[in-house]
Image (cartoon, grey):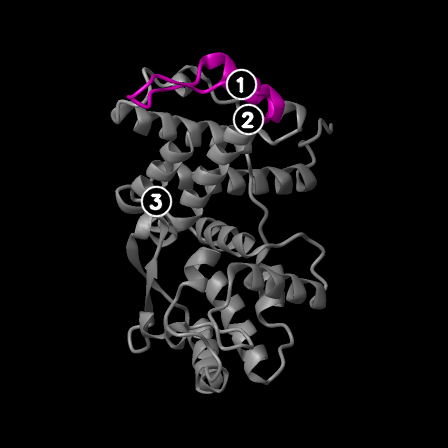
């Protein structure tokens, strides 16, 4: 199975239009399944000469039972099933399994997820907070302004290069999931913050690794800023500004979409800006806005809670 996994990894690196994050998850999930088989001495049979792998439905069910006992979240279990389904689909196509056992597994019903987001006042508190006037403070302000202004993913922000910004048109080129590119607008406050930062950015590039001179956002070593570092920056300013919520970089993306929705933006426009392939992914923000309306109604209307 080791060689099959190496072949699958090469396949998704070259042939499938997947983001690096998705590819890592696929391989990690399959390796976990492989380790489970080994730890539990569940045989993976091979016919002599043709490298045919045999993993039956019972082995998959045993793996899922193990995950449930470990209290793994349903959404994570669903992802692992999808990873295994893709793996066995590839092996079936290559003639290395007789059938795809993962096709007989039903994904668990996942609870409806409504993402956390900032109110408009909280968003303004965060972006208008106190930042140091050195290059790091200017960088941090530009990051927060840009995440809220454009709704881009944290990985997309980390992957930005200096030449992705069109300063005259207030636009930027984003490389999204599956290497798909899109153009998104940048608001005036975010553009100003970017200009202030890039005016001093060159002081950070001296010790960077090869290729990092192109990166828009740099760390103190002159290398491209990682997504984990961006998350730490957000944590810092949420705490400094007294926002009593667990806010991640993705929360700023949710806030961007929700505030556009509340402002009357067309869902198709929001879908395009967020880079969602499916409109159904964008429609969760409709639920979020309705939930907000219901909350206000319950608090404000005298008849909302059975009043007389």
Seen at 54% across and 29% down, the residue is: 77
The spot of residue 242 in percent (x, y) is 72, 63
**Residue at which label 1 appears:** 42
Give the camera-side residue of 240 and 99.
99
- How far apart are the alpha carbons under marks 2 and 3? 28 Å
**Which image quarter: residue 173?**
bottom left
Secondary structure of the residue carrying tag 2 is: helix
Q: Specify few, some or many for label 2: CA neighbours under 10 Å numbering under 14, 14-19, or 20 or more.
A: few
- Total count of labels: 3
Q: Specify few, some or many for label 1: CA neighbours under 10 Å numbering under 14, 14-19, or 20 or more.
A: few
Give the camera-side residue of 225 and 13.
13
> Does 57 appear above or below 135?
above
| Mark 1 vs 3, N-terminal side | 3
Seen at 32% across and 15% down, the residue is: 98
Q: Does the segment drawn in magenta span residue 39?
A: yes
Residue 111 visible in this rendered orientation of the protein: no
Give the camera-side residue of 67 and 282.
67
**Residue at which label 2 appears:** 38
Give the camera-side residue of 279 and 68.
68
Q: Does the segment drawn in magenta span residue 166?
A: no
Mark closer to the observer (2, 3): 2
Seen at 58% across and 51% down, the residue is: 117
């Amino acid at each position: 199975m080791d060689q099959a996994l190496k072949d699958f990894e090469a396949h998704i690196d070259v042939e499938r239009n997947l983001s690096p994050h998705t590819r890592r998850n696929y391989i990690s999930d399959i390796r976990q399944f492989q380790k489970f088989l080994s730890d539990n001495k569940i045989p993976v049979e091979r016919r002599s000469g043709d490298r045919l792998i045999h993993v039956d439905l019972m082995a998959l069910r045993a793996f899922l039972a193990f995950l449930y006992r470990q209290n793994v979240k349903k959404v994570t279990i669903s992802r692992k099933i999808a990873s295994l389904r893709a793996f066995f689909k590839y092996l079936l196509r290559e003639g290395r399994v007789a059938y795809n056992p993962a096709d007989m597994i039903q994904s668990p019903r996942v609870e409806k997820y409504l993402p956390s987001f900032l109110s408009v006042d909280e968003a303004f508190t965060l972006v208008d907070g106190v930042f140091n006037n050195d290059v790091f403070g200017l960088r941090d302000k530009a990051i927060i302004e840009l995440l809220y202004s454009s709704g881009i993913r944290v990985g997309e922000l980390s992957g930005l290069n200096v030449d992705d910004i069109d300063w005259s048109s207030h636009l930027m080129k984003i490389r999204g999931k599956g290497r798909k590119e899109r153009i998104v607008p940048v608001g005036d406050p975010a553009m100003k913050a970017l200009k202030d930062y890039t005016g001093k950015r060159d002081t950070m590039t001296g010790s960077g690794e090869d290729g990092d001179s192109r990166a828009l956002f740099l760390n103190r070593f002159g290398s491209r800023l990682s997504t984990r570092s961006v998350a730490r920056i957000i944590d810092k300013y949420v705490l400094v500004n007294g926002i009593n919520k667990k806010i991640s970089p993705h929360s700023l993306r949710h806030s961007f979409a929700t505030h556009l929705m509340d402002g009357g933006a067309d869902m198709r426009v929001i879908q395009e800006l967020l880079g969602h392939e499916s409109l159904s992914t964008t429609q969760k923000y409709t639920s979020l806005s309705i939930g907000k309306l219901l909350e206000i109604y319950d608090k404000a209307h005298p008849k909302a809670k059975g009043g007389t």
